[in-house]
């Protein structure tokens, strides 16, 4: 979505609200496509003392899979983004300033980039997820598995001594 900010560019105190939806369903993360619902983007551009400030929030519900237990679940995702807008840069490059092109800014591109960078590298169904048993694959969130604990081979001789006493 292209937003024309020329109407507030030289008028301190003015603001320009916006809201739109992004389709990011074709983006792949870790071999999956977790964004099946539209990403709702809303925010505003404010002119404060001849400085244009852009604030937006991109929100959706992800189709997630827990990295520990493999359970599928829905996860709300909200990514905030803020920057300043300018017609020209005076001192070279600045990552916090986005340049306007003919008084316009591509909000869709900014929101998409912010949302992608805000994606989690590890997804958990809950903070205390216990995962799966490495031997039998049982879900440890449902209870302990029936696997017999393996003895470290370096301590096997001591384990035999304990077995003989019993």
Image (cartoon, rainbow, N blue to C red):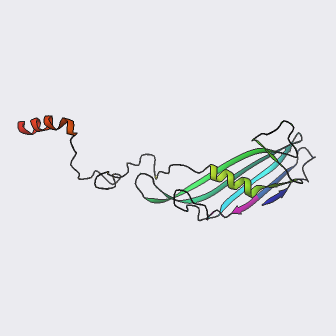
- Give the residue drawn at x 74%, y 61%: 20
- Give the residue drawn at x 57%, y 55%: 76
Pinpoint residue 42: horizontal percent, then vertical percent.
73, 55
Pinpoint residue 62: horizontal percent, then vertical percent.
56, 59
Height in image: 65 above or below 85? below
Q: How many marks?
A: 0
Does the rendering let one see residue 139? yes
Provide the major secondary structure of the magenta segment: loop
Pinpoint residue 108: horizontal percent, then vertical percent.
74, 58
Residue 145 part of the magenta segment:
no
Q: Quadrant of the N terminus?
A: bottom right
Towards the viewer: 64 or 156: 156
The residue stretch that appears in magenta: 19-31
- Give the residue drawn at x 32%, y 51%: 134
Instruction: Tell me if 93 is positioned left or right of 138 in this view.
Output: right
Pinpoint residue 8: horizontal percent, then vertical percent.
90, 50
Towards the viewer: 116 or 15: 116
The answer to which image quadrant residue 138 occupies is: bottom left
Towards the viewer: 58 or 165: 165
Instruction: Tell me if 102 is positioned left or right of 159 in this view.
Output: right
Q: Quadrant of the C terminus?
A: top left
Instruction: Tell me if 55 is positioned left or right of 79 in this view.
Output: right
Towards the viewer: 20 or 110: 110
Does the rendering let one see residue 166? no
- Give the residue drawn at x 11%, y 38%: 160
Instruction: Tell me if 23 is positioned left or right of 28 in this view.
Output: right
């Amino acid at each position: 979505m292209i937003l024309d900010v020329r109407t507030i560019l030289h008028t301190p105190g003015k603001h320009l609200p916006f809201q739109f939806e992004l389709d990011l369903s074709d983006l792949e993360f870790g071999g999956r496509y977790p964004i099946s619902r539209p990403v709702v983007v809303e925010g505003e551009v404010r002119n404060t003392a001849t400085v244009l400030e852009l604030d937006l929030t991109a929100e959706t519900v992800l189709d997630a899979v827990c990295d520990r237990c493999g359970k599928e679940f829905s996860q709300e995702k909200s990514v905030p983004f803020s920057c300043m807008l300018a017609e020209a840069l005076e001192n070279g490059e600045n990552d916090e300033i986005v340049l306007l092109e003919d008084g316009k800014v591509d909000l869709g591109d900014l929101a998409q980039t912010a949302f992608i960078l805000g994606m989690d590298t590890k997804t958990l169904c809950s903070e205390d997820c216990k995962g799966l048993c490495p031997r039998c694959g049982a879900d440890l969130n449902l209870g302990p598995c029936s696997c017999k604990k393996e003895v470290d081979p370096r301590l096997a001789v001591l384990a035999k001594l304990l077995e003989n006493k019993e």
